[in-house]
């Protein structure tokens, strides 16, 4: 059972990666919620018998995804700032243009 569950947890992260790469943030949120639930159930079920190396690998994958998600968030925020600045500049130009 634990191998199937670990495989499922890894598959969750692969699915999450695809959703993020495709910009499907709604699906990514759903996958993340399911993954969190499955991971908690796995830990509750397996407890101290969990294979530590496999969990470390899973955690590393999660950290890489988190880093990528943070980078995407920062890029989106920078893009929004640029749009706001462009909008403000355009408004100012229209105010002073003859």
Image (cartoon, helix red, strand yellow):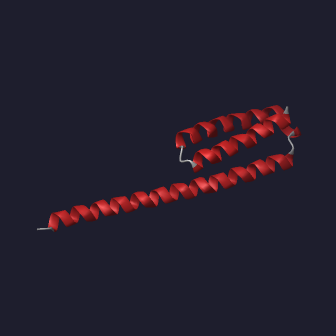
Left or right: 42 in relation to 84:
right
Q: How many dots with numbers?
A: 0
Q: Is residue 91 left or right of residue 33?
A: left
Report the quarter where the N terminus lies. Answer: top right
The residue lying toward the viewer, choosing from 45 and 84, is: 84
Q: Position of residue 54 (x, y in %)?
A: 83, 47
Q: Residue at x 72, y 41 (%)?
A: 11
Quadrant assignment for the C terminus: bottom left
- The residue at 76%/48% (across/down) is 58
Compared to residue 67, the image places residue 4 above or below, namely above
39 relative to 67 in the view: left or right: right
Residue 71 placement (x, y as % from top left): 56, 58
> Relative to 5, is 88 on the left or the right?
left
Among all residues in the image, which is located at the extreme left? 98
Vertical order, 9 against 83 (above or below): above
Q: Residue at x 85, y 50 (%)?
A: 53
Q: Position of residue 46 (x, y in %)?
A: 84, 35
Identify which residue, 14 or 30, lies in the foreground. 14
Q: Quick check: 45 above or below 98?
A: above
Residue 13 image offset from top left, x and y in percent: 69, 44
Please tell me which residue is depicted at 73% across the width and 38% down the height of the picture.
Answer: 39
């Amino acid at each position: 059972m634990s191998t199937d569950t670990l495989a499922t947890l890894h598959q969750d992260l692969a699915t999450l990666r695809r959703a993020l790469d495709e910009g499907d943030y709604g699906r990514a949120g759903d996958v993340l919620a399911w993954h969190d639930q499955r991971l908690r159930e796995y830990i509750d079920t397996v407890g101290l018998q969990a294979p530590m190396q496999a969990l470390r690998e899973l955690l590393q994958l999660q950290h890489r995804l988190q880093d990528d998600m943070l980078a995407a968030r920062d890029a989106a925020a920078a893009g929004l700032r640029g749009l706001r600045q462009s909008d403000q500049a355009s408004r100012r130009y229209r105010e002073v243009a003859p």
